[in-house]
Image (cartoon, rainbow, N blue to C red):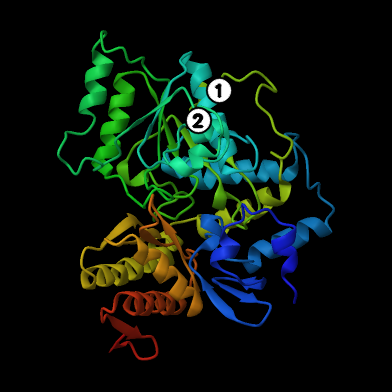
Amino acid sequence: MNNEIFETTESAVRSYSRSWPAVFEKASGSKQVSEDGTEYLDFFAGAGALNYGHNHPKLVAAISEYIAGGGPLHSLDMMTPAKREFLTTFRELILEPRNLDYKVMFPGPTGTNTVEAALKLARKVTGRQHVLSFTNAFHGMTLGSLSVTGNSMKRKGAGIPLTNSSKIPYDDYLNGETEDFIWLERVLEDSGSGVDKPAAIIVETIQGEGGLRAARAEWLRGLADLCQRHDILLIVDDVQAGCGRSGSFFSFEEAGITPDIVCVSKSISGSGLPLALTLFKPELDVWEPGEHNGTFRGNNLAFVTATTAFKEFWSDDSFEKGQLAQAIDLTQDKLMKIAAAVDGSSVRGRGLLTGVCFEDPEVAGKVAAEAFQRGLLVETSGPQDEVLKVMPPLTTPLEELQRGLNIITEAVSAVTGVEIAVEDTTDNTLVTS
């Protein structure tokens, strides 16, 4: 097939197609197949939008049944049976078992939409303008979301000053040499500091694009306590780390905190269809009707697949404590062995939003390129792309997961020249790469 059309007509802004120059024709589970018949294991999962893999048969069946029944596909914020069942199931299977009392807002279909809505709501509720975010944060590509994002290249693309936001150190940013939140506590308590009290602090519990740094549970609890004491709203951006990727449905569950506002998108539909939610405590629901809207906030197909995914994977704890827990254990074990073998490297992240940070920032990109040549899609993360980012579908069969991790091991060995033991999936013996 002639691929010239991608070069001549599509914008130069494209990125993933440059790293992976294949035309993907079919996809199923944790695999994609290109037009030339080459099969690839997918440890990218749509940048976290495909937690249950490509074209999960039960989700595809739900789509087919809904379309065959003539249900409305587009409905803005009108009421439909699909939305009713989504809200009911989300409340009964996700919110209530976790003792979370949140209103559900549909702000638009993407991650940056839910962040924009969260920032706007925080400012409306508090009457304050400033928002604090963290070093190496990533929250989206529209102007409000970019204002709380740390990546200099992404921020530069805005073309105008990004205001009403300041950055503060993320967990361990100062290598443990400075007490957590000491500066923030001091200036909030000092009326002469010249620092205005912010409307909110927005945080990722795991920085998906910022190098896979994962905040400690005690650090998150300290942040939540600080926000409560100073009447500052706490926003958790769970767009990439949520929907099971951290090991629990919401990534903040481990810390035992209840954010004021939660941003959810990516895998909330379960199928890769666009959907986003902004969750917030009922007392924060101060919107006027129509004050924040969007044409595509009523994606009924996404409601249908999300509801199906909730019932399939989250009706009890069997998936979380079974397949998901096993996949996390296997992945973390293999990555720890790689990090132990390569000097200066370390494992980052949590759950299946994880990876290896290399001392030489060029290694991760070379490993990702080598892995592609061996039939694996895996990307990089961090301000210098220094982290190999591993995020397979949560449903990846353990044998396929093992095979993909072996490809990573072999790619690391090829790039670094370090011999690392590789497990033979046929008989569980170890061989040397």
The residue positioned 77% from the left and 56% from the top of the image is 66
The residue positioned 46% from the left and 77% from the top of the image is 400
Residue carrying label 1: 285
Res. 280 mark = 2
Is residue 102 among the parts visible in the rendering? no
State the image quarter where residue 370 is shown: bottom left
Residue 407, position in %: x, y? 41, 78
Amino acid type, mark 1: Asp
- Secondary structure under badge 2? strand
Residue 27 lies left or right of residue 263; in this view the side is right
Residue 116, position in %: x, y? 56, 32
Residue 66 lies left or right of residue 393; in this view the side is right
The residue positioned 67% from the left and 48% from the top of the image is 303
Q: For the view shown, which residue lies furthest in the left direction?
A: 177
Reading the chain from its start, which is encountered first: label 1 or label 2? 2
Q: For the view shown, which residue lies furthest in the top direction?
A: 192
Is residue 284 among the parts visible in the rendering? yes
State whether residue 356 is above or below residue 184: below
How far apart in space, not on screen, are marks 1 and 2 (Cα)?
Answer: 7 Å
The residue positioned 75% from the left and 64% from the top of the image is 5
- Secondary structure under badge 1? loop
Residue 423, position in %: x, y? 32, 84
* Number of on-image labels: 2
Quarter that holds the C terminus? bottom left
Disc 1 to disc 2: CB gap under 8 Å: yes
Residue 174 lies left or right of residue 351; in this view the side is left
State whether residue 429 is above or below residue 313: below
410 and 115: which is toward the camera: 410
Local packing at callout 1 (Cα closer than 10 Å; few below 14, some 14-19, many 20+) is some
Residue 79 lies left or right of residue 182; in this view the side is right
